[in-house]
């Protein structure tokens, strides 16, 4: 345990992140030290860094909540995890409280989110509660040709839409519209397809649309070229031609933008389900009564309960959800460049910061 531990901390809005040494050993009872294999850069991290969205933990704080790695030390009670490859849930519930006991782990009032409530994964090591860790069968990972660092995106970019798809009840024959098919939406489209939905992908980026065309999305639509009303009529014409439903569309808003939310709301039809997966601080003006008039519903979800992680990971290991084409690894030491490049839209795939390269 002579590893030197370093984490990159945020000191203030848009101030360069700095590397700081820290001592992760020994972990407290019930917690483990994980040697980080990779940590994905999420839209939420950029929100804290560039938009001044407040973290719950005071600054300085190490961001990053999409983490995979190996458990290398454990406090009392966590010994069975030592040596295992794991994914750290983006939202770690306490497992003890009333909401947890009633199976509502994502709204646990004592939850810990790395990079928000506690120091996160843009680091060589992280100390987290052992509860909720998702074990990874490394032989299956190897057989699937996926690196441990790449599977870090399961912690949020895959599991958050997995939870959204599950709670929306997508099944065979459903018409699914995914608005915004970037970091999270691309996985949402693949998961909805795996659940039997016919997926229509909407985005303003041709590159993102073409990555899903054919195999995942039955139809791709460029929102830049179509007014919301035309978008709806185009989807209506397509679904009619295919003999698909004109009611009960399941719409996932994954862009986390004002325009995207307006578009998603405009697609409501009778019995529709609107799932708000993306986040923005912006407000939109809608006629909320449309929910009533259409007998529609709107759902949100904060992360995903840890007990659903193994099933989400299985979709990746079985090849139903591909991660490798949608991610790219960068050295952790380049974090300031990577944040800037993601923010400017220069890096289009999910960036994963890797300590050892
Ligand atoms: Zn995230
Ligand atoms: Zn709890």
Image: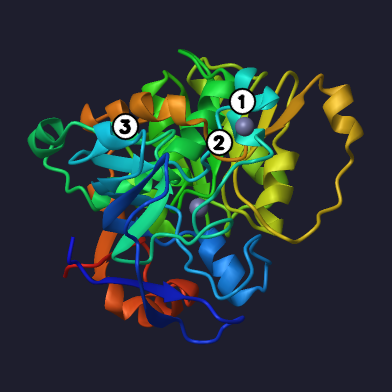
Does 47 appear above or below 324? below
The N terminus: image quadrant:
bottom left
Local secondary structure at mark 2: loop
Does 32 appear above or below 241? below
**Residue pointed to by mark 2:** 93
- Distance CA(mark 3)–CA(mark 1): 22 Å
Quadrant of the image occupied by residue 283: bottom right
Q: Which mark is residue 313?
A: 3
Does 247 appear above or below 323? above
x and y, in percent, of residue 340 in the image: 44, 80
Q: Judge depth for marks 2 and 3 and give the one in front.
A: 2
Depth check: give the residue in front, 178 or 269.
Answer: 178
Ligand 2 under 8 Å from disc 2 Cβ? yes
x and y, in percent, of residue 284 in the image: 81, 54
Ligand 2 under 8 Å from disc 1 Cβ? yes
The coloring applied to the image is: rainbow
Depth check: give the residue in front, 233 or 60.
Answer: 60
Local secondary structure at mark 3: helix
Residue shown at the point (31%, 61%) measured from the top left: 125
CB atoms of marks 1 and 2 within 8 Å: yes
Local secondary structure at mark 1: helix
Residue shown at the point (69%, 39%) measured from the top left: 109
Looking at the image, residue 216 sits to the left or right of residue 325; the answer is right
Residue that extends furthest to the bottom in the rendered view of this protein: 15
Of pointers 3 and 1, the one earlier in the residue sequence: 1
Quadrant of the image occupied by residue 89: top left
Quadrant of picture, ligand 2? top right
**Residue pointed to by mark 1:** 100
CB atoms of marks 2 and 3 within 8 Å: no
């Amino acid at each position: 345990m002579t590893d030197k531990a370093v984490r990159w901390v945020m000191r203030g809005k848009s101030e360069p992140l700095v590397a700081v040494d820290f001592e992760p050993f020994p972990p407290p009872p019930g917690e483990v030290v994980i040697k980080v294999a990779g940590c994905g850069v999420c839209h939420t991290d950029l929100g804290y860094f560039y938009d001044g969205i407040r973290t719950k933990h005071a600054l300085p704080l190490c961001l990053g909540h999409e983490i995979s790695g190996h458990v290398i030390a454990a406090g009392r009670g966590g010994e069975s995890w030592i040596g295992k490859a794991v994914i750290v849930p983006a939202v770690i519930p306490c497992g003890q409280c009333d909401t947890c006991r009633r199976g509502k782990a994502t709204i646990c009032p004592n939850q810990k989110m790395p990079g928000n409530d506690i120091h996160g994964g843009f680091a060589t090591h992280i100390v987290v509660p052992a509860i909720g860790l998702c074990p990874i069968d490394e032989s299956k990972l190897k057989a699937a040709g996926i690196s441990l660092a790449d599977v870090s995106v399961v912690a949020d970019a895959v599991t958050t839409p997995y939870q959204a798809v599950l709670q929306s009840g997508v099944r065979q024959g459903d018409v699914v519209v995914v608005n915004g098919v970037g970091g999270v939406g691309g996985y949402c489209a693949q998961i909805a397809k795996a659940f039997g939905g016919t997926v229509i992908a909407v985005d303003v980026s041709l590159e993102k649309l073409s990555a899903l065309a054919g195999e995942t999305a039955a139809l791709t639509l460029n929102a830049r070229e179509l007014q919301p009303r035309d978008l709806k009529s185009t989807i209506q014409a397509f679904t009619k031609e295919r003999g698909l439903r004109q009611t009960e569309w399941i719409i996932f808003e994954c862009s986390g933008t004002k325009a995207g939310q307006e578009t998603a709301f405009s697609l409501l039809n009778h019995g529709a389900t609107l799932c708000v997966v993306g986040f923005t601080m912006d407000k939109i003006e809608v006629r909320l009564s449309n929910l009533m008039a259409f007998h529609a519903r709107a759902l949100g979800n904060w992360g995903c309960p840890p007990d659903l992680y193994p099933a989400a990971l299985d979709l990746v290991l079985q090849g139903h959800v591909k991660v490798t084409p949608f991610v790219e690894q960068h050295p952790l030491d380049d974090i300031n460049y990577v944040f800037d490049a993601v923010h400017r839209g220069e890096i289009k795939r999910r960036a994963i910061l890797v300590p050892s390269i």
